Amino acid sequence: MTTPTLGLLESAFADVELNAQPAAGAYSLPASMYRDGPIVDIERSTVFARHWQLVGHRSQLSTDGDILMASLGGLDVAITRSEQGLRGFHAVCRHRAGPLEPCRGGGKTFLRCRYHAWAYGLHGQLLSAPEMRGAEGFDETSIRLPEIELAEFEGLIFGRLEPGPASLEDVLTEVAPRLTRAGHALSALRFHERVSYDIDCNWKTYVDNYLEGYHVPHIHPTLNAILDYRSYTTMLSQWHSLQSSPLESAPDAYGSGEALYYFIYPNTMLNILPGRLQTNRVLPLRGNRCRVEFDFFYCEAPLANDREFSDVVQEEDVRICEAVQRNLDSGSYVSGLLNPTRESGVHHFQELLRADYREALRRAKEIRRQA
């Protein structure tokens, strides 16, 4: 990933308070950070390249030869399973940047470029390049797809493009004991389906909304009826946060027990409910939009009304996030004081962003000093 120049960073952060803010008096990031512009490239290189993001579940790669496609910070990646285990690669052809897709032929699975049919094996090496033998200097054995780092937690597969500040084990510390106490075994779940929402809002607008239950009584009447808002709590760790609430509903809705909503910086959400898991990935798109990919996992068969109930909640979130984004774009709003009790998760997320922005400035200054 290209490191943004110091001039670009200083321009982008001209009206942004980058120093850490205590929760009791913290203001939200300014509206300028939620608009299209240089912040997109800054976040791609500094936030999305260096931090772990969910790419799938082991149940989606259960057999040697399986390939799972995903996206990390605007880059398409391919996760492969072979006798060597799981590996991840840039899904970008080394010829002229064509898109790669899973393909099967001759009893084998491989990645094939849709543009000129170059083919790559499960270990990332070039297998064939039609009509390239006459090209001077062409060496098929030297061409490989760039590899990404992978790590697993409870059957969930995470990836990152560059070395970052923490291992996945450090990022998810304290999660496994909590899941064990609650009787959740994520590795036993199986993938059922994916539902995607393309939303007219910045990716941070959607994440901010996810990270607080403050809006639940006003935006989600059906969900609010089965959660105990008075007992709704947020717990913060270095790289993740947990919102939880007692849950009491009909068996064909969310069931009874406890709702656990984990956010893993920068864009992964684990919604853990009795007998199932919903994972969300919030992916930035061009034009200040985002895509939220919902994957549904169950121990056995899906609950009868689970998908319908989820759709209602998500459509309510989409409407409010798009309305908020219109106001962020309007010029009327700059920044607002956060509720230290109900919006501690928002503050935690934005402090991690501020730390990454400071790191981007530090790296750019170091590059200038060395020039």
Image (cartoon, helix red, strand yellow):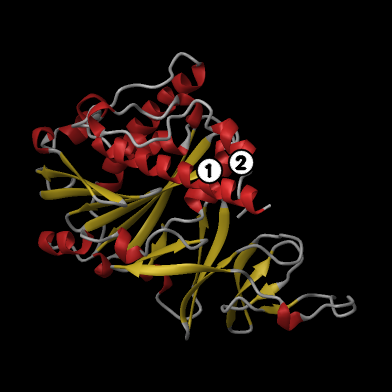
| Residue located 55% across and 37% down the image | 39
Residue 108 in the image: state x and y as whole percent. 58, 82
- Relative to 356, 22 lies left or right: left
Residue 140 placement: quadrant? bottom right
Three-letter code, disc 1: Leu
Residue depicted at x 33% and y 34%: 209
| Number of numbered labels in the structure image | 2
- Answer above or below: position of 78 versus 45: below
Locate residue 106, reporting x and y percent: 64, 84
Q: Are marks 2 and 1 in contact (CB under 8 Å)?
A: yes
Which residue is at 51% across, 21% downward?
329
Q: Nearer the viewer, residue 145 or 99?
A: 145
| Image location (x, y in percent) of residue 213 | 22, 34
Residue 255: in sight, yes or no? no
Which residue position is annotated with label 2? 6
Q: Residue at the spot x=59%, y=43% of the render?
A: 41
Circle 2 SS class: helix
Camera-side residue: 226 or 15? 15
Callout 1 secondary element: helix
For mark 1, what is the residue?
361
Q: Quadrant of residue 355?
A: top left
Q: Nearer the viewer, residue 156 or 12?
A: 12
